[in-house]
Image (cartoon, rainbow, N blue to C red):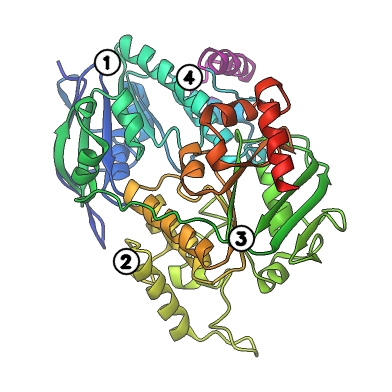
Amino acid sequence: MLRLELVNISKQYPAVKANDSVNLLVAPGEIHAVLGENGAGKSTMMKMIYGAVRPDEGEIRWNGQAVNIRNPQEARTLGISMVFQHFSLFDTLTAAENVWLGLDKSLTLTEVTQRITKVAKEYGLEVDPLRPVHTLSVGERQRVEIVRALMTNPKCLILDEPTSVLTPQAVETLFVTLRKLASEGTSILYISHKLDEIRALCHNCTVLRGGKVTGTVDPRTETNAGLSRLMIGAEPPQLQHIQAQLGGVVLDVRGLTLPKEDHFGMNLSDIRFEVRAGEILGIAGVSGNGQQELMAALSGEDTRAPSGSIHLFGKDISNHAPRRRRKEGLHFVPEERLGRGAVPTLSLAANTLLTRTEAVSSAGWVRTKDVTALAQELIRRFNVKAGGPDAAAKSLSGGNLQKFIVGREIDADPKLLIVSQPTWGVDVGAAAQIRGELLGLRDKGCALLIVSEELDELFEICDRLVVIAQGKVSPSVPTAQATIEMIGEWMSGLWGKSGTQAAAKETDHAEA
């Protein structure tokens, strides 16, 4: 008997038909991938299974019986749990309190806290149950979501981009967990844009394009190119990575030491690196090791940096506010799209005004036609699927909103661009486009600093790499001389140990 069956499911929104007569079959113990480009309808389909969205047409069957799942609580009662790509956590509550909200209230908060610690340890997902969510990085919030879902002992677990901010070691640990759950009869619906992961983990794969199913295949017998063709109708373009033409030092961070602002933050200790014109420096690291604090100091959100610790073109900008830094050529893309990168309820046109002032007169008047034209050009240039410049930011899929936000800053022709998680949750075609645009910016002489937890991405586009661990930064190493194994070791703070020590010394000597 099938665990889950969708029969001719359709969902229409005002501007788009998200799902068009979709069919899906999932057996007990099956790990079933759902693949598709951004805006293909994957998340809408998952939300209907979870009861967060109601289908317009079609039928959902659970263990062979037709069901009407009216809300997530009814889904959880059936045994369906979901980890959303955009998290559903309350910022002011602790991780334990957030988990407790979705569980049987016969358990006390103390018991839930103890169970979180046990489950997190069992599955290799480090979670501090007592930390308020607002102090957590994106990766740490994702771990809370995964642990919360596992706490319900689900019969069907839906994971939307679960590994987007996990390290390779954490991904392997998660895969062990998922295979164990599947062997115990749990069905897993796995949404991911990482084709290698799908081919390594999943038994079946349903591919969506434009809200319709284009095929169901065994990914273990498919190539990445074959899956890409099903998903986007073509193979993703190959990146053109030419030899870097280095210019002068653009960003120079000298001994940046900064105490954490709250109890759950991370102290920054003697951070030192530089970024030159015409190169991309990548920062690797496990989420929560000081990335947030470093990005706040560099972007100007935190102006407590000691004088002389941050220089832009030789000028001390340690205490400059974000607006002043933008005027000096520094642009920044935060890891959080909604709430920091964009205002959810504002239109795409209005969101351009967060960092772009070309359409604002010297007297402060906004030229609305120019604002609309800019948004329209960004939509066109970066192939953003949206209902036009007037569409609210929250109406876009995560990947399309990411393309718009990254495009907004690339199009500003920055001298230094700092990007955190540039392709988080973005499909292979859009990821290739964003990475290609970043390389194009570098080839024009821009200096780029990329923070990413996707090591494959860093190896693909960066000229040099550093690692951040426990608020400290490793020596830099040319990407061509690095390996994923070495960087993975450095992510534990071991860059001064044994085999990696020689590489660090060699790199320091080369930079000197």
- The Cα–Cα distance between marks 3 and 1, rounded to whole angstroms, is 53 Å
Q: Nearer the viewer, mark 4 or mark 3?
A: 3
Q: Residues within 10 Å of mark 3 (few under 14, many from 20)?
A: some
Q: Which residue is mark 2?
A: 387
Question: Which numbered marker is on residue 246?
Answer: 3
Q: Residues within 10 Å of mark 4 (few under 14, many from 20)?
A: some
Q: Nearer the viewer, mark 2 or mark 3?
A: 3
Q: Which residue is mark 4?
A: 173
Pick whichever of labels 4 and 2 is earlier in the sequence: 4
Q: Residues within 10 Å of mark 2 (few under 14, many from 20)?
A: some
| Residue plotted at (83% across, 44% down) | 257
| Residue plotted at (47% across, 58% down) | 439
Image quarter of the N terminus: top left
Q: How many marks?
A: 4
Residues marked 1 and 2 touching at CB (< 8 Å): no
Pick whichever of labels 1 and 2 is earlier in the sequence: 1
Residue 159 occupies quadrant = top left
In this picture, residue 422 sits left or right of residue 38? right
Question: Which numbered marker is on residue 29?
Answer: 1
Q: Nearer the viewer, mark 4 or mark 2?
A: 4
What amino acid type should be assigned to the residue bearing mark 4? Thr
What amino acid type should be assigned to the residue bearing mark 3? Leu
